[in-house]
Amino acid sequence: MITRSYFFNQPVLTIIIVCILLCSPVHISASSLSGAVKGLKINQISNFNEIKTALSLLQTSHLETVKKDNPDLKLQQLILEKAGECVSKIVSLIQESKHLDKTKKEIAPKLFALNNNIISSILETTRQEVTHLQETKLDNIKDTTAFFTSTEWQQLQYIISLASYWLSWNSYYWCTLSPGEKDCSLKMLPEAVKGFSRSYIDFREESIITRSLFGRALCYKQMREYGKALRDINAVMKRITSNDKLYFRIKYEKILVNYLSGNFESAITQLNDFQKELTGIRLRLILMRESAN
């Protein structure tokens, strides 16, 4: 369960979450669901059990909101954003634990699976809502341009794109951090590629566009489609500067993909250039430190 310290100074939030997870769904209000989800501090979670509790809350909140005739789209979007944070936190917890015991090794894939179910369900129910709108409203609307630019339609499309993005990251890490998982190369990674392709096209935010390309490159690498991986890696490198958090990671991935594809000369040349660049950065940092003193 989420520890006492996690909700320290948040007693109202604690009560709401306990009610949602343990009490009758009939008495749960939309505002309670939204408040509980919004109050989740995923970055403060410190273990897998807390992540499981947070994901259970997200799942309950999603299932309750879709029971209504008019699902709360803002709440669905919020659940997706928190589910995305959970992907990052699960990965972080795995990386922080140098030696996972057998129990933790079994828990991590289950958390990815639970998150996968949540995001997939949101994606499916939103697609159903789009179909419903098309069948019930589109034929009776004279100005179709106004319909497709309406807030409701745009928000539904945004949720689909956001769900595709985070489902792809969840699938990628599920496969790479749980190597024994079935259907990774045959099903999950190809689906992740499709999701990243959609978010790359749909989003206007440069950071998501860039990270969609990066995620797709990582999937192609895992699928051993090295030519496609290099294409996306080069596209990412053209979009970022040396200040971007991806800058060094993308250079590392390019060296690795060239090596894996058998292009050893390019890999060695790039590795040497990379080492020179790192040496130059270290020297600049030393000079900055000395001048500050």
Image: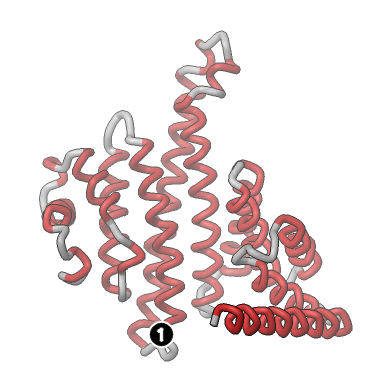
Residue at the right extreme? 265
Q: Would residue 195 be visible to someone looking at this image?
A: no
Q: Which residue is rendered at x = 44% and y = 89% of the image?
A: 98
Q: Would residue 225 be visible to someone looking at this image?
A: yes
Residue 204 at x, y percent in the picture: 61, 42
Tell which of 270 and 68 is nearer to you: 270
| Residue bearing mark 1 | 97
Tell which of 186 and 260 is nearer to you: 260
Residue 156 at x, y percent in the picture: 47, 35
Q: Which residue is rendered at x = 66% and y = 83% of the image?
A: 282
Left or right? Give the position of 183 relative to 231: left
Residue 194 at x, y percent in the picture: 63, 52
Left or right? Give the position of 99 relative to 249: left
Tell which of 214 and 25 is nearer to you: 214
Q: Which residue is rendered at x = 59% and y = 45% of the image?
A: 205
Left or right? Give the position of 8 relative to 193: left
